[in-house]
Structure formats: C-alpha cells, structure tokens
Image: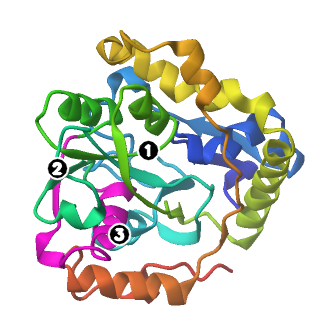
Amino acid sequence: MADNNTLKLFHLPFSFVLPQRVAVERGYFEAEGLDVDLIERDRGSVEIKYIPAEETLTGDYEVDLYPVCKWESLKRTWGMGDGEVVANGTFADQPYTVFTRPETAIESPTDLAGVDVAVNRRTGQEYTAMRALEEHVAPEDVSLVHYGMPTDRLRALRDGEVDAVTLLDPQSTLAEQLGFEPILEFENHMGIVGGDDVDSDLLEAYVAAYTRAVRDINADPESFRGEYLEMLEKDARVAPDLFEDVDMDVLRERVTVPRYEVPELADREDLGAQLEWMKERELIDDEAEIDAIVASLG
C-alpha cells in the first residue's frame, strides 16, 4: 500500500466521478484506513482538459490513482509510462450526446459522414465518438476536430464554427436549453490508473469506499443534486455568455442525477480488444503490449 496509507487521488470534477468526492466527504476512505489527499485543478485555470497532456500524473504530480477515459488510459500508460490500468467500467448511466443546430440538414447519425464533430482530443469523447460514429458511417468519413472544454464546444456550435459537438450531462441539458438537438448517444467508458505503490489492498480499499458512496447516491440521488451541478456552476462563471438567456432554475430542475456503477478490476480481454482497435486506427504505437499496460496486482 502507498506510504503511511496515504492515497494521493486525482479528481476530475465531472459528474461521472461524483462518488469519488462523496467518499472523501463522508469519510469512507478514512473508514478503509486510507488518508486521502484529493488532487484537483481549478476550473478557471484549465483551458483544454483537466488531465495534462504533457505531464505524468503518477510522476510529475505524484498521484497514486487517477480516473481517465478507458482509451486514454491505454495511451498514457504505454506512451508516457504514466502508471498501469488497474480498473475500468462505465461508472455511470450517463451517455455522451452529439448535438447539432436545428437549422442544419443533419437529421440522423448517418448524416454526420464528413461533418466536423467538435471534441476534446485525448479524452473519452474522442475515442468513444470515433467508435460510435463508425457504426453509422465509414471510418474514413469520421471527422473529429479539437475544440477543448464543453463551454468551448458549445460556443463553436452556437457561433456556427462547427455543425456538431459531443457533450456529457449536465452540459447536455444546457445544450437542450439552448435549443440544440441531440442526434446520437453513446456510452462513456472509464479506466482507473495506478502508480507503483498501488497494490491489491489499496485498490480493494478504494473500491470499498467508492462502493459506499455509489450506494448513497443511488439510494437518494436528489440529495446530491447540488454537488452534481457544481461543474455547471463553474462553467457559468468562466463562460457567462452561454448562460445569458438560460433560466438557471429551470436548468437545475431538468438535470437528472444518474445512476452510478462501481469500477471493476481491469478487464484484460476487453482492454486488449480496445488496444487492437487503437492500433488499427493508428491511435497508439503498433508495438504496444497489453501486459505492459494492465497491472498485475500483488
């Protein structure tokens, strides 16, 4: 286990990892014998994405565990040596949604062939959007363009810079309030990456605390609405122009707190299949090996 039972845990302030913060606030990690140091980045200082592309979390940030998109977990662990994948799952019943402006000619997912879809590169939406779109259009007709944070993508859609964007809730609910139309939904898949000090005991303690938080939220989701909406409130502060014509009370009421799931021990077979897909799409080094990516916890 990590030194002195201290767990340096990187937190993404996104709604799909809400249980992680709840487990900290309710003392569930402490009950499992872990002294958690929650590492976060301020929303106001993040221009592109929360997980830095050029720095390692397990090295530069000295993090023990961090959640990340399943496909990016493969890319970071292999290409950057940023830990090993220890767990994965869907984490929440909360899909990505592709939105378009109502005045476009896009009426179905097949109409997205050759259409630029705004994403945040090297996050879940890039890889999941690519896979989802390939079910409706030829791989060579998938066109993803980098536009950064959800607020940046919404602005690009509003201003006509792109005709389609990917979003997660609660930003999806905001998009509906702004009059944009959903055209495609697809699942959000996550992974958890661990550093050198992560062993089976630490992971078991982490999952046990996370599980208690999941049960709390699923039993009474309405009582967690305020915490769930924190990301949207932060967006309103950094991008007030997107909220000028939005009734915030109505927006808050329309947001639904999702049902959460517990991450499971890394599925080597599933991750291996995803790795092969990434190789085919030239998203990762062709020499990448699953045994060097997925942890064998002792």
- Closer to the eye: label 3 or 2: 2
Q: Which mark is residue 132?
A: 3
Residue 92 is situated, as x and y percent measured from the top left of the image, at: 63, 55
Residue 26 falls within the magenta-colored stretch: no
Q: CA distance from mark 3 to mark 1?
A: 33 Å
Q: CA distance from mark 3 to mark 2?
A: 20 Å
- Residue at 45 percent of width and 67 percent of height: 70
Residue 138 falls within the magenta-colored stretch: yes
- Which residue is tagged 1? 61
The image shows residue 227, relative to residue 32, as above or below, that is: above
* Left or right: 128 in relation to 94: left
Residue 184's quadrant in the figure? bottom left
- Residue at 24 percent of width and 38 percent of height: 101
Amino acid bearing label 3 = Ala
Q: Is residue 48 visible?
A: yes
- Magenta stretch, residue numbers: 122-147
Say what secondary structure mark 1 lies in. loop
- Residue at 52 percent of width and 90 percent of height: 269
Which image quarter holds the N terminus?
bottom right
Which mark is first along the chain, 1 or 3? 1
Which mark is first along the chain, 1 or 2? 1
The image shows residue 234, relative to residue 147, as above or below, that is: above
- Which residue is tagged 2? 105
Residue 30 is situated, as x and y percent measured from the top left of the image, at: 83, 43
Residue 22's quadrant in the figure? top right
Q: CA distance from mark 2 to mark 1?
A: 46 Å
Say what secondary structure mark 3 lies in. helix
Q: Which mark is residue 152?
A: none
Residue 122 is situated, as x and y percent measured from the top left of the image, at: 29, 56
Amino acid bearing label 2 = Ala
The answer to whether mark 3 and mark 2 are in CB contact below 8 A is: no
Say what secondary structure mark 2 lies in. loop
